[in-house]
Image (cartoon, rainbow, N blue to C red):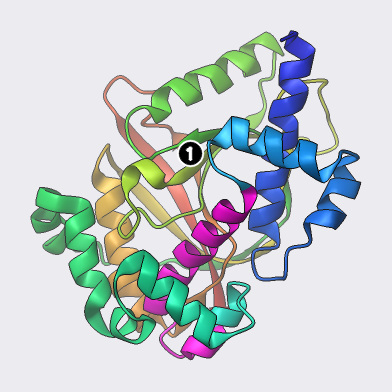
Amino acid sequence: MKKETLEKRVKIANNIMYYIYQYIDTDINLDTLSMDLNISKFHMHRIFKEEFGKNIYESIKAIRLQKASNLLITNRYSTITQIASLCGYSSQTSFIRAFKQRFNCTPKKWKRDGYKEYSKEILGNTIDSLDIYDFNIEPKIIKMPRLKAYYIRHDGYDRTIRKTWQKLYTWTLTKDIKNYKQIGLLHDNPVITPLDKCQYIACVVLEDQEETFESSLPTFLIPEGIYAKFHLKGVYGDMLKFMRWLYHTWLLNSGYETKTTPSYTIYEKNHFLEDDEKFILDFYLPITYV
């Protein structure tokens, strides 16, 4: 396959995935998407399956249920019906059936305490150190603008992310880009999602948002919104501890709820690129007032 053809196919697949995440709370219309991309539905489904190893409908279902599993924990004032609607389910009955099939637990039980047992299975021996870690960080509540990002998608949340960041860093050197932010965007909560199933996106956001580059890398927009901003310093592994505290302790007692839009980090020092694996970063959690 020619390089330009391969790059075009990757862009199409990434655009489809971005569209799914952007409109996960709606009745996703694949006819509209195929028209927007100017390709047939057959071609769209084939490219997506070849790039991601599963079909579009399977991905939509998996993403909806992952979003719901997180919101059931963090949005304690929302009903199961409201959360089902936030994740694109028009029927509570179909949502409960799909959730139980995926997590072997009803949404009601999960919301109460079922997620704790599931989290233990996901994290295994790591759980002991996570339980005793207490951050006690007070965030700043700020409004963030919409950000245009060049990105590379990565499957999994582990040290292999380093290779993806190295590729993205190489791209900045090739383009002689000097003024930019490194942003890591995480669609899933790794404390309740198998680490190899987490969707991580390594992003470069130019300081001058008006500047553009001809590039094989796809772009997408990180949405504007209200975020709780946490400043952190640590080493590789501390982020899992932080996210467990954030989603299972801080958020439950904060008076806020989170949204279906993803959290992200802006790195001052990126542990995936540092030999000592230390980081300095700001973590942005999308929130809404209850």
79 within the magenta span: yes
The residue sitting at 56% across, 71% down in the picture is 259
Is residue 274 visible to us here? yes
Is residue 203 visible to us here? no
Q: Which residue is mark 1?
A: 267
Q: Is residue 196 left or right of residue 4?
A: left
Magenta-drawn segment:
56-82
Quadrant in which the N terminus is drawn: top right
Tell me: residue 53, above or below residue 229: above
Q: How many marks?
A: 1
The residue sitting at 71% across, 18% down in the picture is 6
Q: Position of residue 215 (x, y in %)?
A: 77, 20
Front-most of residues 32 and 282 = 32
Q: Main secondary structure of the magenta part?
A: helix
Q: Position of residue 223 (x, y in %)?
A: 69, 57
The residue sitting at 78% across, 55% down in the picture is 30
Question: Three-letter amino acid code at disc 1?
Answer: Tyr
Front-most of residues 127 and 117 = 117
Tell me: residue 120, above or below residue 94: above
Q: Quadrant of residue 55?
A: top right
Q: Is residue 35 left or right of residue 53?
A: right
239 within the magenta span: no
Tell me: residue 189, above or below residue 80: above
Q: Callout 1: 10 Å neighbours few (<14), some, many (20+)?
A: some
Front-most of residues 286 and 8 = 8
Q: Is residue 189 left or right of residue 262?
A: left
